[in-house]
Amino acid sequence: MDDLRFPVVNNDVEIGFNFLPPLDEGGTKDYSDESWFVRILRVKIYIAVAATILLSSYALYVRYANRSSVVYSTSEEEMRGKTILVTANPTGIGLEAALDLARRGGRVILACSEIKEAQVMAASSDTFQKGGVILARKLNISSLREVRKFAADFLKTEKRLDALLLAANLGGSDTKHVTDEGLELTMAANHYGHFLLANLLLDILKTSSPSRVVIMASSAHSLLTSVNPKDLNFETIVYGALRAYAQSMACNLLMANNLAHMMLELGVTVNSMCPGMIQSQPYIRGNGLITKIYLILLNVATRTAEEGAQTLIHLAVSEDGAKHTGAFFVDCKERNMTPLGKNHGLAKKIWERCEEIVGLNQRKDK
């Protein structure tokens, strides 16, 4: 039998890029003859490797923190005889919450921009054994005109509203976009539309008491320490995708707190919540480098829509949702708010500014 030998490595032959060249006879490498191009290339490679390791480590940490803390709602409360309105994305926590509430026997009206997908979701379910139903209704929440028409139609056909869940959501864009009504799109979709809808339905919520309002206010709001009520549409403040999203979430949180104060003793509880990182509800969107890196992280670290919907469901059905008001919930538990979230004076100023923006201050009953 032939001898088995290790192959001889010829250090005089280099194939492709030799990122770590062989040492010289003295055991060290002399870089004096190395071109500046090779030196720069070498540094860039080291930086890229280090960045990849750091990003991967961070992604794994975020995944652990985001996924390991998931808490499922344990409430067994039924929703027979109750009407719930849910604003939702074509996919995401709003749809999951609607399915859960319908399984509990609720009459769920699902307001969604993609009506066909919502109808398919509603019609394909065979799990509503307790008499629950999902009725899909088209609503572009970023359009104030559509919100007004939707609310008017709702009040004509519905006699009560036991819970209003505001879960539709849009990430900030790489570049600023303005609606045909002159509103920054992220603020319009996440805040102005919901602000207007909640105000137009306040009377039916009060006559249906005890009733509930649950508003999505992602923890991204904690990235901000201040919000300027005079420039909510980024007319003078420099626009940024993450800032736009964080501001819309901060406004939602402050709206929930102010509305909770207004509804004290009126039988309507109002709370806000964060679903965690959900792929169907990214903080930012677009084609920029930062956005692409963020979306890679999102693919690794996100919760499922079902997992993200648990706090929304918890506040809609559990005793916590009835006994708490003006609270912020994460993973089905109340959490402390940031100083920004506790700023009642700012909440009132933003409320009054939003009344002007959406036209509520023009109502005769104001």
Image: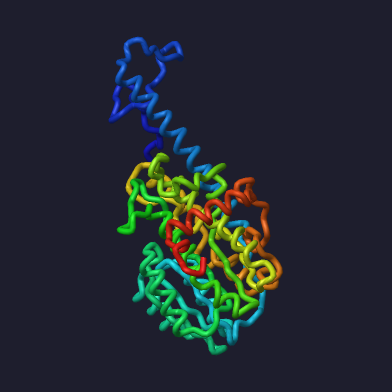
- Residue 273 lies, in percent from the top left, at 58, 60
Residue 125 visible: yes
Total numbered labels placed on residues in the image: 0
Asked if residue 323 lies left or right of residue 139, the reply is: right
Residue 296 visible: no
326 and 356: which one is in front?
356
For the point 55% across and 43% down, which residue is it? 226
Considering the image in quadrants, where does the N terminus appear?
A: top left
Asked if residue 335 lies left or right of residue 90, the reply is: right
For the point 37% across and 38% down, which residue is it? 2
For the point 29% across and 24% down, which residue is it? 13
259 and 362: which one is in front?
362
Q: How is the image coloured?
A: rainbow
Q: Hey, which quadrant is residue 115 in on the image?
A: bottom left
- Residue 365 lies, in percent from the top left, at 51, 69
Vertical order, 204 against 259 (above or below): below
82 and 73: which one is in front?
82
- Residue 179 lies, in percent from the top left, at 33, 57
Vertical order, 233 against 9 (above or below): below
- Residue 159 lies, in percent from the top left, at 52, 85
Q: Residue furthest front?
A: 364
